[in-house]
Amino acid sequence: MTNIEQPAPENNPNEPPGTTEPSVGGYAPPPQAPPYGQAPPYGQAPPYGQAPPYGQAPPYGQAPPYGQAPPYGQAPPYGFQYGLPMGPTSLHGQPLAEWWQRFLAILIDYVILLVPEMIIEAAIVGSAISSAFVAGNSSSNNFNFLSTGFDVTAIVAALVIAVIDIGYFALLNGGAKGQTVGQMALGISVRDQATGGPIGPQRAALRIVVLLPNIVLTAIPVIGPILGSIALLWVLIAALSPLWDSRREGFHDKVAKTDVIKVR
């Protein structure tokens, strides 16, 4: 019995590859990639492991192939970096600052504030000592005058330092950039959780008082130094609180409704 061979299908040169009909045996050739430089049909991803044409973004929410940079001028989908997820982000997709960045930033700010505050405090105390000795030469109750004068001097010095500290953080964290000098050095910024914009001086002042209540408590007469020392325990806990928070928020961030984000 003679076998009749089926004629092979003719390839139409005008048809793209992969559009021929299946053979009689039911075998269909695998889909082929589009010609070089031609994008796949809209909404269809390129074959697995193959990069999209140069200059064309991958499908929405899909990272570029491992080791391949995104098209020029286009950022990769947030959360992808070399195939690994990045850290927590704000509601606006901005990466949140690391704890060590926040710690080093406020340490720099403390050093910056310490120098002028020591000069101002020395000037106030020196002026009080001079006044006490001048008044003591003409006063019969020298001891009581000196002790009262130094109490007042300590309160005045604490108030001046509190104004400097709160004003520094209120103006810089509440400004357009939301950065103190230390935060500029570390590339982080304080922003509003809801809008991603500046928080204003009032909320910035509230934020720093919640973090450092000792700068206010120290200025209270008589019991101020005692309260300020007790408040240092709270400062330690509040400063460490971003470490165990899933969104890296400190207690002061929760009160002021702020995020500390990376800006570079």
Image (tube, grey):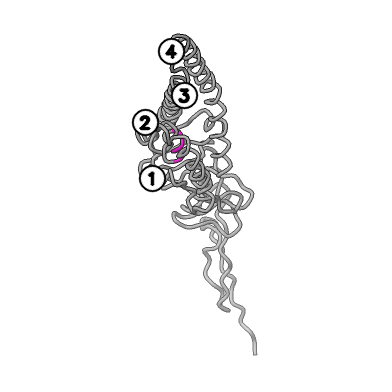
Residue 147 - label: 3
* Image location (x, y in percent) of residue 64: 56, 51
Badge 1 amino acid: Val
Which badge, 2 or 3, is on the more N-terminal residue?
A: 3
Instruction: Estimate the spatial distance between the alpha carbons at disc 4 and disc 3, rounded to whole Å.
Output: 14 Å
Instruction: Estimate the spatial distance between the alpha carbons at disc 4 and disc 1, rounded to whole Å.
Output: 51 Å
Which badge, 2 or 4, is on the more N-terminal residue?
A: 4
Q: Are marks 4 and 1 in contact (CB under 8 Å)?
A: no
Q: Quadrant of residue 3?
A: bottom right
Instruction: Estimate the spatial distance between the alpha carbons at disc 2 and disc 1, rounded to whole Å.
Output: 15 Å
Q: Residue furthest front?
A: 140
Q: Quadrant of the N terminus?
A: bottom right
The residue where tag 4 is placed is 139
The residue where tag 2 is placed is 201
Instruction: Estimate the spatial distance between the alpha carbons at disc 2 and disc 3, rounded to whole Å.
Output: 37 Å
Badge 3 amino acid: Ser
Given residues 226 and 54, the one toward you in this image is: 226
Given residues 196 and 219, the one toward you in this image is: 219
* Image location (x, y in percent) of residue 260: 47, 41
The residue where tag 1 is placed is 255
Task: Tell me if mark 1 has few (under 14), some (14-19) or many (20+) residues whose alpha carbon lies within 10 angstroms of its own.
Answer: some
Element under disc 2: helix
Name the residue: 61% across, 57% down. 49
